[in-house]
């Protein structure tokens, strides 16, 4: 006679993946905001093993990615700002190579040699103007 756990697995396979729980939705949001897995597990009253298992679910991973993207849009990090500046364009749509090279140098931690500290600081500053 087949054991109950095997029977349950067979039924789950036929019915498809379970919908995400409210805790999984909350956990995805927290991970997307940059929380550590151990902190999410503690906050939700679960284990890091469960969080790792959730991360293998495509629906859960999509929620984490969406939350991460929203978080970066609302709270850009210096690296994300510099990364976006790598594709900077001028108002006419032409590539802004000076901005792109400056961002690349800043990301690589390199500044032109032989400049004063003030010139080096100016070299790594990036100003992004919003489109009107």
Image (cartoon, grey):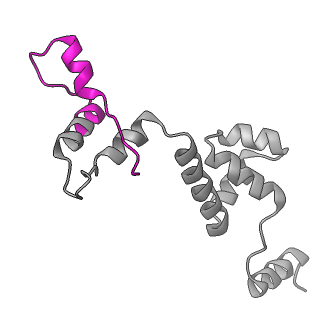
Residue at 79 percent across and 78 percent down: it is 9
Residue at 63 percent across and 44 percent down: it is 33
Residue at 30 percent across and 28 percent down: it is 125
Residue at 74 percent across and 76 percent down: it is 17
Quadrant assignment for the N terminus: bottom right
Q: Is residue 50 left or right of residue 107?
A: right
Q: Is residue 80 left or right of residue 116?
A: right
The residue most toward the front is 132
Camera-nearest residue between 32 and 95: 95
Q: Which residues are magenta?
A: 104-132
Question: Is 117 drawn above or below residue 67 in the view shown?
Answer: above
**Percent x, y of residue 31:** 65, 47
Question: Is 91 drawn above or below residue 17 in the view shown?
Answer: above
**Percent x, y of residue 116:** 16, 11
Q: Is residue 37 left or right of residue 46?
A: left
Camera-nearest residue between 28 and 76: 76
Q: Is residue 85 magenta?
A: no
Say which quarter of the image contains residue 23: bottom right
Say which quarter of the image contains residue 2: bottom right
**Percent x, y of residue 27:** 73, 51
Question: Is 67 drawn above or below residue 15 in the view shown?
Answer: above
């Amino acid at each position: 006679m087949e054991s109950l756990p095997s029977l349950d697995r067979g039924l789950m396979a036929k019915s498809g993946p379970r919908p995400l729980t409210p805790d999984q939705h909350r956990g995805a949001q927290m991970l997307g905001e940059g929380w550590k897995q151990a902190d999410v597990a503690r906050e939700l009253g679960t284990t890091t093993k469960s969080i790792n298992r959730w991360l293998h679910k495509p629906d859960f991973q999509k929620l984490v990615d969406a939350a991460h993207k929203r978080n970066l849009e609302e709270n850009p990090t210096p690296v994300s700002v510099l990364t976006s500046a790598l594709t900077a364009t001028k108002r006419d749509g032409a590539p802004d190579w000076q901005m792109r090279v400056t961002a690349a140098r800043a990301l690589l931690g390199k500044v032109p040699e032989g400049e004063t500290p003030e010139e080096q600081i100016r070299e790594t500053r990036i100003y992004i103007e919003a489109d009107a």
